[in-house]
Amino acid sequence: MGGRFGIACAVAAVAVIVSACGSSGVTTTPKAAPPVGTSNRSTTTVCRPLGTATGSTLTRVCGAAATATTGATNNINLHLTIDGMYKSQKVQGTVIPGSLRCTPISTGGKQGLQVTWGGTVNGVGQVSGDMMFAGGTTSITFGDGESQGEASLVLKGDYQNRYGASSATGSGTENAKAGYSGGTIDGVLWDGDTASAPNMHLQGDWDC
């Protein structure tokens, strides 16, 4: 309420305490607006485009960062499991997705993809990682000495004990769908440069 109408109401309120200005006499308490980043819907995980790349491919961000800037809702299409050893302890579980970013990259004039993701695992805590496909590459075989791509995994923000796989380390594969619209991974990532190092099996799929 503002302007001259608000002033008139204030004057009327002083003169007649029991009367209501601009209403039928029934007063209601306005509901507070929801905080930024929330929604009245039950699902608030969303994805929003961040930019463009070659063709019509869009960089997309999913999760809380996107929720605050759009009213739309959408599930994060990230389905990963981990299984391995972390600091001499067994770690196993399903990643509860919290964020997913698919960023087009260019290598040698050809389009590729960088995927970064984050989430939690029950009994473990925060996990995050990335997967990279160099330009023009859609199939990676870790440890083959020639594949142009990589994958990494970090538990509890412990980057000193980061697990990784590339052409030089790890084993297994990661594959991208046509147009880099998503992909799969089934790889063993090493915390070191040899197969005897602690490792983590990362398996699953995602859609950008």
Image (spheres, helix red, strand yellow):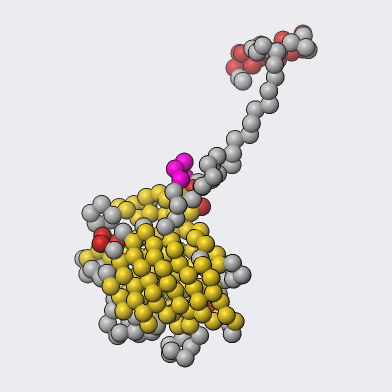
Q: Is residue 27 above or below residue 125?
A: above
> Which of the 4 image quarters holds residue 170?
bottom left
Q: Is residue 83 above or below residue 51?
A: below
Q: Is residue 48 left or right of residue 13?
A: left
Specify the farthest residue to the left. Answer: 109
Picture residue at 48% right of the left edge, 54% below the top: 63
Q: Is residue 105 visible?
A: no
Residue 116 in the magenta stretch? The answer is no
Q: Which residues are magenta?
A: 69-73
> Which of the 4 image quarters holds residue 28?
top right
In-front residue for pair 198/149: 198
Picture residue at 43% right of the left edge, 79% below the top: 189
Main secondary structure found in the magenta portion: loop
Question: Where residue 84 sits: x, y (%)?
Answer: 51, 80
Q: Is residue 175 visible?
A: yes
Q: Is residue 49 above or below residue 93?
A: above
Q: Quadrant of the C terminus?
A: bottom left
Picture residue at 43% right of the left edge, 89% below the top: 195
Question: Where residue 115 sits: x, y (%)?
Answer: 38, 64
Q: Is residue 7 left or right of residue 42?
A: right
Question: Where residue 81 sits: x, y (%)?
Answer: 48, 70
Question: Where residue 145 sits: x, y (%)?
Answer: 30, 85
Instruction: Count the numbered circles shown.
Output: 0
Q: Quadrant of the N terminus?
A: top right
Q: Is residue 118 above or below residue 154?
A: above
